[in-house]
Amino acid sequence: MDQDTRLEHVAIAVPNLDAAVAVYSAVLGRPDSGREVVESEQVEIALFDLGSTRLELLEPSAADSPVGRFLERRGAGLHHIALEVTDIEAALERCQVAGLQTVGAAPRRGAGGRRVAFLHPAGTGGVLIELSERIR
Ligand code: CO
């Protein structure tokens, strides 16, 4: 059994990254830990390291992108949580056996060069879940 899983990050969709960074900087009393453009997801991300996990603020780079459409439909808010797994192919196979649907191509390249896959919220209690393979 794999006991080495953890909450890798929590991602929040925002319309304006600078404004959102200012809010979370005020909450945490420090600047963000870095920024990254993730072409595969059409987002720019600001990170706040939080011990063994981190917060990701996501601003879409295009209105017609997954996060852009999410903002249009639902407004700013919790977008997904990322759970770290040691072997993403094995995790996807378990999820498939459990009847869960993936979203988009899986696995693909996510932030930090990780291999990631997304599980549809319909099967997971309404939460978009990112599987994120640990970097060895
Ligand atoms: Co993510």
Image (spheres, rainbow, N blue to C red):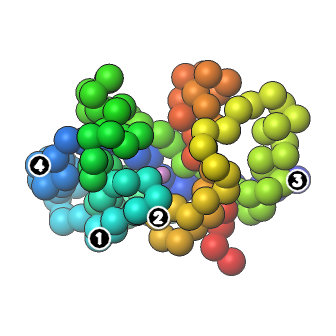
Q: Is residue 70 above or below residue 3?
A: above
Percent across and percent down for residue 16 are: 16, 47
Task: Please report whichever mark, 2 or 1, sits nearer to the chain's N-terminal start.
Answer: 1
Residue at point 34% right, 54% down? Answer: 43
SS for callout 1: strand
Residue at point 81% right, 28% down? Answer: 99
For the C terminus, give its image quadrant. Answer: bottom right
Residue type, mark 3 in image: Met
Q: Disc 2 beta carbon < 8 A from ligand 1?
A: yes
Residue matched to label 2 = 111
Task: Please report whichever mark, 3 or 1, sits nearer to the chain's N-terminal start.
Answer: 3
Residue matched to label 1 = 34
The dot on residue 1 is 3
Name the quadrant containing residue 132. Answer: bottom right
Residue matched to label 4 = 19
Task: Please report whichever mark, 3 or 2, sits nearer to the chain's N-terminal start.
Answer: 3
SS for callout 4: helix
Q: Is residue 73 left or right of residue 39?
A: left
